[in-house]
Amino acid sequence: MNVSKSPLRRASALVAGSLIGLAGVAVFATPALAHHSTVSGSASCDQESGKWVVEWTVNAIGDGSQGQTFQFTQVDLTPAGTTLDNPVIAVNAAAQPAGVPITAKQLVPGDAASSSLTIASQWSNGFQDKKPASSTVEFGEKCVKTPDEEPSTPAEEPSPSPSTPSEEPSTPPVEIPEEVPAEPILDITCDTISIGVDNTKNDTPFTVEYKTSKGEERTLVVKPGESKSEKFSATEGFFVEVTFTVEFEGKTYSSSGTIPWTEPEEGCDDGEGGGLPVTGAAAGGVAAGAAGLLVIGGALFFVARRRKVKFTA
């Protein structure tokens, strides 16, 4: 029997031919089937901003070749005006490794109905998507911002605030006892001016704050039993803004005024300084600086007049 011409030999030849043909188809078809892009997305509502947050994942799958890369040839995003927070997902962006998933977030207005992302890729071996990959995320409802409840708290606070100051004027002023003696000190020379408090007979502390026309600021504390003053160099046009503050029975009383420097009564023709020292109630008789001191006297001259004087804080 001739085996080469037998039906078995012919059948074997047909099977072998078919296998070879299928293998060839597989070799040429596999790269085309391997190269494709995928897109998937999911959404969540950010109640702090009232916007949808869509998280996208894209992947440009190649043929598995080592070092293979790709670039996007198409990136379409809806709704219009929205963007992705990953700059890699863009046409002509830098080449990326094939087969590695890439993620990005998209912020969408809370009243939007859906969002979509469509991409197409081209690989470093020349293959490119014949059909773009696309995915759509349906929201189904609106994303609403959670109301901020904090403003309601301060809105309730202003109601008691107006009532607090309205009660203060009705509080009767504290009477300063007449047995608390103290006197202001004013001493003017041709080139200086000294201002302070004679507190030697008093058991209440005084604070004196100074601010000169030159911008200098000082603070003087005169304790009970002390007599202190601050001296300033002075010329024409110089003045001192003074604030006297006295504490009594837990309350603070203040009086302020401006004391200008003026030439002493005897003049300064010799250029040698000197002048008329002025202290206490005698300040009313000195034209230079007396007017300003008397304004401040509201906090101090109650002790010189030896009678009770009411002050309102």
Image (cartoon, rainbow, N blue to C red):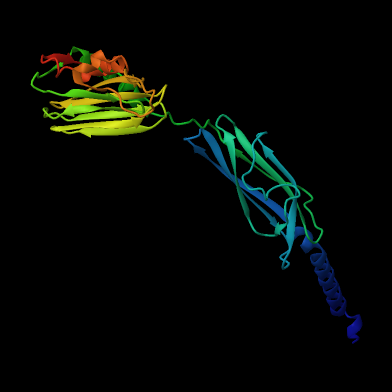
Front residue of this view, candidates 106 and 16:
106
The residue under the point 88% across, 76% down is 10
In this picture, is 128 found above or below 169?
A: below
Mark yes or no: residue 163 visible: no
Front residue of this view, candidates 258 and 177:
258
Residue 125, by quadrant, is bottom right
The residue under the point 44% across, 31% down is 146
Residue 9, by quadrant, is bottom right
The x, y position of residue 124, in whole percent, is 78, 60
Horizontal arrangement in the rendering, residue 177 relative to residue 33 (left or right):
left
**Given the current orientation, which residue lies at the most extreme left position?**
179
The C terminus lies in which quarter of the figure?
top left
The x, y position of residue 296, in whole percent, is 26, 19
Mark yes or no: residue 186 visible: yes
Horizontal arrangement in the rendering, residue 104 relative to residue 44 (left or right):
right
The x, y position of residue 75, in whole percent, is 72, 44
In this picture, is 22 found above or below 297?
A: below
Q: How many numbered marks, from 0 up? A: 0
The x, y position of residue 227, in whole percent, is 18, 31
Horizontal arrangement in the rendering, residue 7 relative to residue 117 (left or right):
right
**Given the current orientation, which residue lies at the most extreme front position?**
270
The N terminus lies in which quarter of the figure?
bottom right
